């Protein structure tokens, strides 16, 4: 009988995509500081912030797609929790950025649907 699980190489690539996504979002969260801190950005930091936001959005969208293709929660659970937690930390600082919040919400929804 035909197997319903993805090709092993594809599974490996998806796991790498999640790991990279986790690092990207986590790095942005770490740069912004603890959830309860107020980030003082100089004008020189604005270009960094825009680039980091774009990277974070791409990482969250990538994670969202991986969650959507995962066969079980066990495959992605540890990384999913890390990505969602780091994304939440970014969102507390970047609430006025529709694209960051939207990407995180989509990622959260994908992860939630995986658990249903």
Image: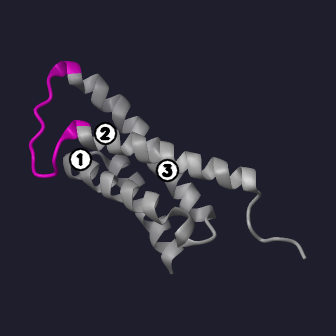
Residue 36 on the magenta span: yes
Type of colouring? one colour
Give the CA separation, mark 3 to mark 2.
15 Å
Rendered location of residue 51, percent (x, y): 37, 29
Residue at left offset 18%, top offset 42%: 33
Q: Which image quadrant for residue 56?
A: top left
Q: From this viewpoint, which residue is outermost toward the bottom?
A: 116
Q: Which SS class for mark 2?
A: helix
Kindly identify which residue carries mark 2: 28
Residue 52 part of the magenta-drawn span: no
* Within-10-Å neighbours for mark 1: few <14, some 14–19, many 20+: few
- In the rendered image, which quarter contains the N terminus? bottom right
Q: Main secondary structure of the magenta part?
A: loop
Residue range in magenta is: 31-44
Residue ID for mark 3: 61
Among numbered discs 2 and 1, the one appearing first in the sequence:
2
For marks 2 and 1, give the one nearer the viewer: 2
Numbered-mark total: 3
Q: Position of residue 57 (x, y in %)?
A: 42, 44
Residue drawn 58% across the image and 64% down it: 68
**Residue 61: x, y in percent?**
49, 50
Query: Residue 44's quadrant in the figure?
Result: top left
Disc on the earlier residue, 3 or 2: 2
- Other-residue count near label 2 (Cα within 10 Å), few / some / many at <14 / 14–19 / ≥20: some
Judging from the image, what secondary structure is the residue with disc 1 in? Answer: loop
Mark 3 or 2: the one toward you = 2
> Which of the two residues, 99 or 81, is positioned nearer the viewer here?
81
- Vertical placement of residue 54 versus 99, above or below: above
| Numbered tag placed on residue 96 in the rendering | 1
- Which residue is at 41% across, 52% downward? 103
């Amino acid at each position: 009988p035909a197997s319903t699980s993805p090709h092993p190489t594809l599974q490996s690539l998806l796991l790498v995509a999640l790991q990279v996504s986790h690092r990207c979002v986590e790095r942005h969260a770490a740069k912004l500081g603890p959830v309860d801190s107020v980030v003082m950005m100089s004008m020189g930091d604005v270009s960094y912030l825009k680039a980091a936001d774009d990277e974070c959005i791409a990482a969250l969208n990538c994670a969202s797609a991986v969650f959507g293709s995962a066969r079980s929660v066990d495959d992605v659970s540890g990384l999913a929790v890390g990505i969602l937690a780091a994304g939440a930390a970014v969102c507390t600082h970047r609430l006025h950025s529709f694209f960051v919040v939207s990407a995180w919400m989509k990622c959260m929804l994908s992860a939630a649907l995986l658990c249903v």
